Image (cartoon, grey):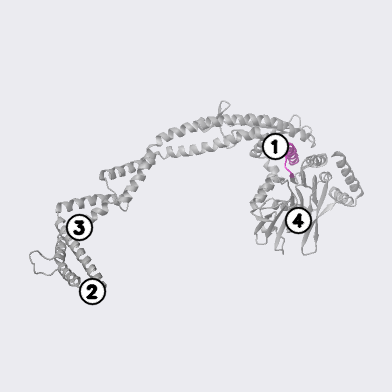
């Protein structure tokens, strides 16, 4: 017996539920009631604790919020406990406290182990703790994809190993094929792009621009265009500083500064402050002499060459042609050329890349074909065992002559290039292999096996799903199972056998069943009833545990609609005795 996972659940102001405590015991718990609404609210509450969608309409009219709280016993080493502790939750004496609050405005909050957590964490924990099954799950079993998932789950590592390798190779093939398609379908666009890049690079290479050349040429053109004015100004400035050689009597700045220096030099010994001024005047004289010399050299070196000016303007025009097309200045032009050269090398290598990708694609298809064959073999072997086990369970569910089998097939690809080779044929394939898995049911001898979507009634489908879960319980156990009226369409002897098999499942797991069948409820270790009260204004519901005489009365009501009927009571007591003897 595994540890009890769901100990209790407290529900407040959720729909018609006002304030109820649902105590869940080890083994098999049945939940019944006069109408389906209250029972459904119990299932809804569990769904909220497991991360289900919150809806403000679930909050009872007049209440500010609805709260669902649960106490779950977990092994501290389990993955669920570890994940909760990673989120900051703490265990309380080996139990995990979970709560979900929905406000009347629709806001939802979740807490685990005293810590506020994202609602998504509840869903993660639920995957490890509880398997929920209802009418929608039965309909899901009709889909081939769900049937394949069930078979793969039963097969375990025999399928999981090759499927993991297959999935990785399949993802890589998708990526390779997408890149290959882009290279081949956009070949013309890429060729045009390469031609434009090549033309631009050739144009830049022919001009051979140098870094900063445009700024240097602009300065030189400005200087050459005003050469005469510059030379005249330099000459006038030189004369003002150093004088004119042909006018020895002329006054210049250098002579005036020299005179000032001589005047102070004679008396500098009498005052240090004046001596400092004399030194500064001497420095001014030296600076004037240097500037005058440079002005003379500038005027001599200045070349007003019209031919050079024309050559500079022509070079500037060539560079301007480049900057109009490839950048704001020559630095941007050279950066564009560097980027374009790298892109052109990439485009020119497309042919080689296409060859590499084509070879990789073919290798991946071959690998997928081998892995798909391994998946087919593993599924075929597991299908025989799975079908035999489910068939054996159906015999105990009042379907002694029913036979379950699996049809595993592949669909040939319309074109060989669109498929992978499995068993010497090119077949269609997907992310889970090339197999199409379908669960078949032959309900009685002589009936051909037919897909359960076409050949199973509602009651038969309920029993097939229950048989599948009982088989799974031995191969891949889950701590807690919640069944929401999966006995729909079942009655009589079949209902008794459904109860018996649920009791068997409860030997290795906790089982909670919402049911309308007394034959099923009689097999439960604990019987809970959702009761309604109405004060004329508000309808409220609560949950009560049925024991002893109360349980007999509830079963009588479920059997005949009459709690005090002697015949119904006798039948109820007989059911309980049969259930106790048949566990």
Does the magenta-highlighted stretch encompass residue 473? yes
Q: 519 or 576, which lies in front?
A: 576
Q: 408 or 507, which lies in front?
A: 507
Mark 3 surroundings: few (<14), some (14-19) or many (≥20) residues within 10 A:
some
Mark pair 1, 3: CA separation: 96 Å
Mark pair 1, 4: CA separation: 39 Å
User: Helix, strand, or loop for circle 1?
Assistant: helix
Q: Is there any visible trace of residue 126 in the rendered image?
A: no
Write down the residue under mark 3.
Answer: 223
Q: Considering the image in quadrants, where does the N terminus appear?
A: top right
Write down the residue under mark 1.
Answer: 452
Write down the residue under mark 2.
Answer: 270
Q: Along the horizontal axis of the image, is 398 left or right of 77?
A: right
Magenta stretch, residue numbers: 453-480
Locate residue 401, reporting x and y percent: 78, 32
Mark pair 2, 3: CA separation: 51 Å
Q: Along the horizontal axis of the image, is 498 left or right of 147?
A: right
Does the magenta-highlighted stretch encompass residue 384? no
Image height of 224 relative to 156, above or below:
below
Write down the residue under mark 4.
Answer: 10
């Amino acid at each position: 017996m595994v540890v009890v996972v769901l100990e209790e659940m407290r529900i407040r102001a959720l729909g018609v539920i006002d304030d109820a405590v649902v105590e869940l015991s080890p083994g098999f718990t049945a939940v019944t009631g006069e109408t389906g609404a209250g029972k459904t609210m119990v299932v809804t509450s569990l769904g909220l604790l497991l991360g289900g969608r919150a809806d403000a309409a679930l909050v009872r009219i007049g209440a500010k919020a609805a709260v669902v709280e649960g106490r779950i016993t977990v092994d501290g080493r389990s993955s669920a406990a570890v994940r909760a502790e990673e989120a900051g939750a703490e265990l309380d004496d080996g139990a995990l406290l979970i709560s979900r609050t929905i406000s009347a405005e629709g806001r939802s909050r979740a807490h685990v182990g005293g810590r506020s957590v994202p609602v998504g964490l509840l869903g993660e924990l639920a995957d490890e703790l509880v398997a929920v099954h209802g009418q929608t799950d039965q309909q899901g079993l009709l889909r081939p994809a769900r049937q394949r998932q069930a078979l793969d789950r039963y097969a375990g590592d025999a399928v999981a190993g090759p499927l993991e390798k297959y999935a990785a190779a399949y993802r890589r093939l998708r990526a390779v094929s997408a890149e290959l398609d882009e290279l081949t379908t956009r070949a013309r666009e890429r060729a045009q792009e390469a031609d434009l890049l090549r033309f631009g690079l050739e144009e830049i290479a022919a001009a051979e621009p140098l870094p900063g050349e445009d700024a240097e040429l602009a300065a030189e053109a400005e200087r050459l265009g005003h050469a005469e004015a510059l030379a005249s100004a330099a000459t006038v400035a030189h004369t003002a500083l150093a004088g004119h050689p042909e006018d020895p009597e002329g006054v210049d700045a250098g002579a005036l500064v020299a005179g000032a220096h001589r005047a102070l030099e004679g008396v500098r010994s009498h005052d240090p402050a004046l001596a400092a001024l004399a030194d500064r005047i001497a420095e001014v004289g030296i600076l004037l002499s240097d500037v005058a010399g440079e002005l003379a050299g500038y005027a001599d070196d200045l070349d007003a060459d019209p031919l050079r000016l024309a050559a500079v303007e022509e070079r500037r025009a060539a560079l301007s042609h480049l900057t109009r097309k490839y950048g704001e200045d020559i630095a941007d032009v050279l950066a564009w050329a560097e980027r374009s050269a790298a892109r052109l090398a990439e485009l020119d290598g497309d042919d080689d890349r296409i060859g590499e990708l084509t070879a990789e694609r073919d290798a991946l298809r071959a690998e997928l074909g081998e892995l798909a064959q391994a998946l087919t073999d593993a599924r075929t072997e597991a299908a025989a065992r799975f079908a035999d086990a489910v068939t054996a369970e159906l015999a105990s569910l009042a379907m002694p002559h029913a036979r379950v089998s699996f049809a595993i097939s592949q669909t040939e690809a319309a074109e060989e290039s669109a498929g992978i080779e499995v068993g010497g044929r090119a077949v269609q394939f997907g992310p889970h292999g090339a197999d199409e898995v379908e669960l078949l049911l032959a309900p009685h001898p002589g009936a051909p096996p037919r897909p359960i979507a076409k050949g199973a009634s509602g009651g038969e489908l309920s029993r097939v799903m229950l048989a599948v879960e009982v088989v799974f319980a031995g191969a891949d156990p889950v701590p807690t199972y919640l069944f929401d009226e999966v006995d729909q369409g079942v009655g009589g002897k079949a209902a008794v056998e459904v109860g018996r098999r649920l009791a068997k499942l409860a030997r290795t797991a906790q089982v909670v069943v919402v049911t309308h069948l007394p034959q099923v409820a009689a097999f439960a270790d604990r019987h809970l009833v959702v009761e309604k009260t109405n004060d004329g204004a508000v309808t409220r519901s609560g949950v009560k545990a049925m024991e002893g005489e109360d349980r007999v009365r509830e079963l009588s009501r479920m059997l005949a609609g009459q709690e005090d009927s002697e015949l119904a009571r006798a039948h109820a007591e007989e059911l309980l005795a049969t259930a106790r003897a048949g566990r």
